[in-house]
Amino acid sequence: MAGLGIRISSPISIRPKLACMPLERSRQWISPYEQMDPQKPLVKVFLSQSAYCRISLHAASELDDEVGGALIGMWCLDRDTKEQFVVVQHMLPARHTRQGSVYLTFTQDTLVGFHEELDRNFTGKRIVGWYHTHPRMGIFLSHYDTFLHNNFFPEPWQVALVVEPHKSLGGFFIRDAEGSLSPTRYYGFYEMNGNMGRNMVEWKNLQSAEDDERG
Ligand SMILES: [Zn+2]
């Protein structure tokens, strides 16, 4: 547990990138919570199809033990609406983890590894959050997950993705504008280019917002 409180993220350039939210090309996937009771998370999450596929492959590679990693991309501010969003473009499987069927934990070396790989291969990108699997469990954040999230991913715009590989479920945990995070209420996301050709999302607990509109 030693050193868990250390923050490695750099204090410089801690500003979002000005950009246009890529809503038109994206397909929105919504969670049951969003259908029942719409609330506004601090950031919208845009996930590239390649990152989605890599995360799904990693999640399915280990069906008994939890696995996880970092979500790599950009933290942005829409030029017009001034809404914040994150774009997940890549993932990095975590090394130096302690894992068991009950929980996975990141160590300080895991974080150091993420930052080294970021500097080497993804210059200018940020760690916008993390993902991990819950084999044969639901989509939620345990007390320990919440602890990891707040210690290793403390920026308000950093998100946590939980994936269940057996039933094929997934959801994002996103802080609200006040910085608080529900451990049970998860959000869907925007599948980038999901409106351009084939959509790839197979998480059964999320519904395409377009299907909803069509009735
Ligand atoms: Zn967990």
Image (cartoon, rainbow, N blue to C red):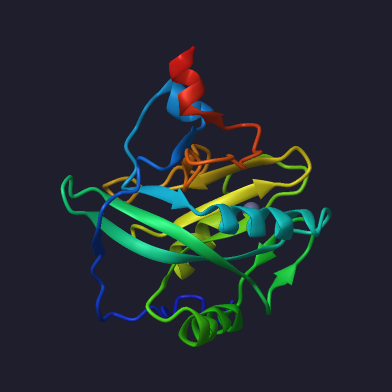
Q: Where's residue 85, x and y in %?
A: 33, 52
Please determine whether, in this image, residue 213 is positioned above or below residue 207: above
Nearer to the camera, 76 or 68:
76
Q: Where's residue 6, x and y in %?
A: 44, 80
Determine if residue 82 is in view: yes
- Residue at 64%, 72% (x, y): give it: 94
The total of numbered circles placed on residues is 0
- Residue at 55%, 28% (x, y): give it: 207
Nearer to the camera, 154 or 167:
167
Nearer to the camera, 71 or 108:
71
- Residue at 52%, 29% (x, y): give it: 208
Snapshot quadrant of residue 76: bottom left
Please determine whether, in this image, residue 11 is positioned above or below residue 175: below
Left or right: residue 114 compared with residue 67: left
Name the residue at the left extreme: 80
Q: Where's residue 57, x and y in %?
A: 72, 57
Left or right: residue 121 compared with residue 42: right
Q: In which quadrant will I find the N terminus? A: bottom right
Name the residue at the top extreme: 215
Left or right: residue 187 compared with residue 110: left
Snapshot quadrant of residue 105: bottom right
Determine if residue 142 is in view: no
Q: Where's residue 36, x and y in %?
A: 45, 21
Name the residue at the front extreme: 197
- Residue at 18%, 53% (x, y): give it: 79
